[in-house]
Amino acid sequence: MREASGQGPTIRVIDGMAGCGKTTLALHVACRSAERFPDGQLFVDLRGHSTRTRMRPAVALDTLLRQLGVPAGRIPLELPDRQEMWRRELAARSVLVVLDNAADSRQVEPLLPVSGSAVVLVTSRRRLLALTERPPVSLAVLAEAEALELLATLIGSGRVAAEPEAARQLVAICGCLPLAVGLAGTRLAHRPDWRIADLVDRLSHRSIFLPGLRAEARSVVEAFAESYEPLDEACRKAFRSFGLAAGNHLDTAMVAALTDLPLRDAADVLDELVDRHLVQETSAGRYRLHDLMRRYAAELARQEDEPTTGRPAIRNLLDHVLHSMVRASASIEDGRVLAQHLRLGEPLRPDLLAGRVDRDLDWLEEQRSNLDAFVRQAADQGHEPMAWRLARAGWRFFYIRGYFDDISATHAVGLAAAQRCGDRHAVALMHNYLASACVRTGAYQDASAHLHEVVSILTGLGDESGAQRARFNLGAVHWLTGRLHQSLEANRMTLRSCALDTLPVLPNLGLTLRYLGRYDESMAVHRLHLFAARIKQDPFHMSNALGHLGGLRYRLGQNAAAERLLRASLALRDRTGNGFGRAETLSDLAGTYRQLGRYDDALRHHEAAIEAAAASGERHVQAQARNELAVTLGATGRADEAVAVFEEALAIATRIGHPYEQARALDGLAGHLAEKEPAQARRYRQRALAIFERMGAPERHDLRRQLVETPA
């Protein structure tokens, strides 16, 4: 990377046919120059070789920003905002970025820096001439000498020297393509008694015609065929099955589902395929194909299998993935609710679930990239009921991990699939969970539209309990958008409905009462929530109830009780792995410490609250936590810092349309600007008063008094 001058970003493009070593070269350069980039090296596979799997620039930016350590909740939703954040982050860092498998310039351009000293290496099968004035580094093939050197590293220089003409013929058959030379060389390395001429003879007289790879060197196909043809039928079927599945990788049980093999037999078959370098084992029990191999496998499946073979195989795979997800989600999702939503039957292959671990969130994380592909494949290939079920099964995991883009993508596909198969219950379900992503990302109007659609559909179907549940969810949107009386009515209606579990209703009702200043009623509701949670032994709701009771005690100035309750809530959350609401609890505990005069503890917990809110994607809590921090900064005499933090809170709350924290920030700014800029302070107070009046919040009384006491 001698060309990197430090006076601006360096963009280099490496192009060439698949399998020619583009990624290998980029990673080699990155490894050799690691010391020159102290702020890190980033990698993203743009999956540009297929329109079905191609990564959108917005998703790529999300991945890259997360690699930089930006919390999920801080990443903007829209592409231009993500692009701005990405370029701002790179401007201050010395990093090397590898953008692998780019489809075209349009996919890459939003990912490029415009300032700073970053170096970006782009690999693509296409010539991307629009990205940089420098010509691309093209790696169509190796030179003959380089191909012979690669062969010698695999089989030994002595064997190459003993048969120089045969070695040249072999690399010529391979088209000097690194992937093909590697396959042929590995084949010889495992057969020390073979002459190079023996393999040349085999490759010269065997051929499989693949229309999908006509543009590629014919010798690549022959090298693949040489590895494929000796396989027994079980291995062949397993190899071809990789060409059927849309996922990025498969594990042993998935292959068993695809091939209808017993699990042990599938494991043996995969071992054979790995030994023959047809399949790569990326980690223990996880397998993938190079994209050329995948295309080869797909073409073989088209040629050798009956047209009707693929559909039941994919159905078996998707059924297994669905049941595996339900099992892995046991610790974060009520199994009864999930089973009711999915209308789940018995698994087609219960034997394959024996090795699945209940409550396996790590497995769900591994499957994250697969799930979107499986949902789309199900929708595209006539398995519409499976498409929406897979989306729903992944919802809770995506929700608690802050993968709201994933919720939006999978449930949008699931919604279209449910509409095509005429399942109105499923349509309502997809709308409901699309609304959840909208709520968490501050798109409250979209959330409201989705939920009104749910109410309309379920009312028409006569599902009053489902419609009431959607009205209850609308109550949460009303609360977030400052319509407290509408929220109160929605929660009361839900409580009056005997068809629904009251446990999730109580916290929303208690919070609404608190924001209305009806503290005694709020306390009674939160106590009832805690009691009901303890009766049901539900740690999720127990921790929430403790946190809400502590927050109420804090606002009443009962600091000793507040600290005890809030710390108990955090301890229970940490013990059970429940991060939902943790940020708000930390923020309330920080405020409690401020009221106790323990400012160092308060500041430490404020920072923890802001970090937790960003990580969980709770955008309204990001504003709340900053407002609380600003109050503490003001109490410790750091007025200028307090003003800056209030302004941050105001910007966040305004962007997502959260009026309560908007008004708090405006009121806080007015307090700090009262002496220096009294006219501006009065305008801020008037705006805050208008919001609090509209909400019916108790803060309106103090603001009215302050405005009367400080006339214009």
Image: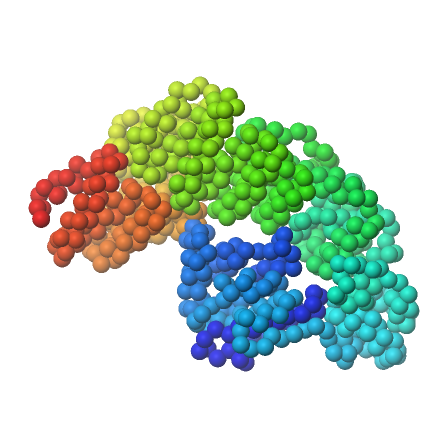
Q: Nearer the viewer, residue 116 or 295?
A: 295
Q: Nearer the viewer, residue 604 or 137?
A: 137
Q: Nearer the viewer, residue 635 or 318?
A: 318
Colouring scheme applied when the structure was drawn: rainbow
User: Residue 636 placed where, x, y %?
Assistant: 22, 53
Badge count: 0
* Visible residue check, residue 540: no
Eyeballing the image, is 707 above or below 18? above
User: Residue 320 placed where, x, y %?
Assistant: 68, 39
Residue name at image x 14 percent, y 39 percent: 704
Q: Is residue 407 left or right of residue 174?
A: left
User: Residue 35 placed where, x, y %?
Assistant: 53, 74
Q: Is residue 198 left or right of residue 301?
A: right
Where residue 379 sits, quadrant-wise, is top right
* Visible residue check, residue 273: yes
Eyeballing the image, is 64 above or below 563? below
User: Residue 603 placed where, x, y %?
Assistant: 30, 52
Q: Is residue 64 left or right of residue 652?
A: right
In the rendered view of the protein, which quadrant contains the N terminus?
Answer: bottom right
Residue name at image x 81 percent, y 77 percent: 157
Q: Nearer the viewer, residue 235 or 559?
A: 235
Residue name at image x 68 percent, y 73 percent: 139
Where residue 299 sits, quadrant-wise, is bottom right
Q: Is residue 582 left or right of residue 410?
A: left
Eyeballing the image, is 182 above or below 438? below
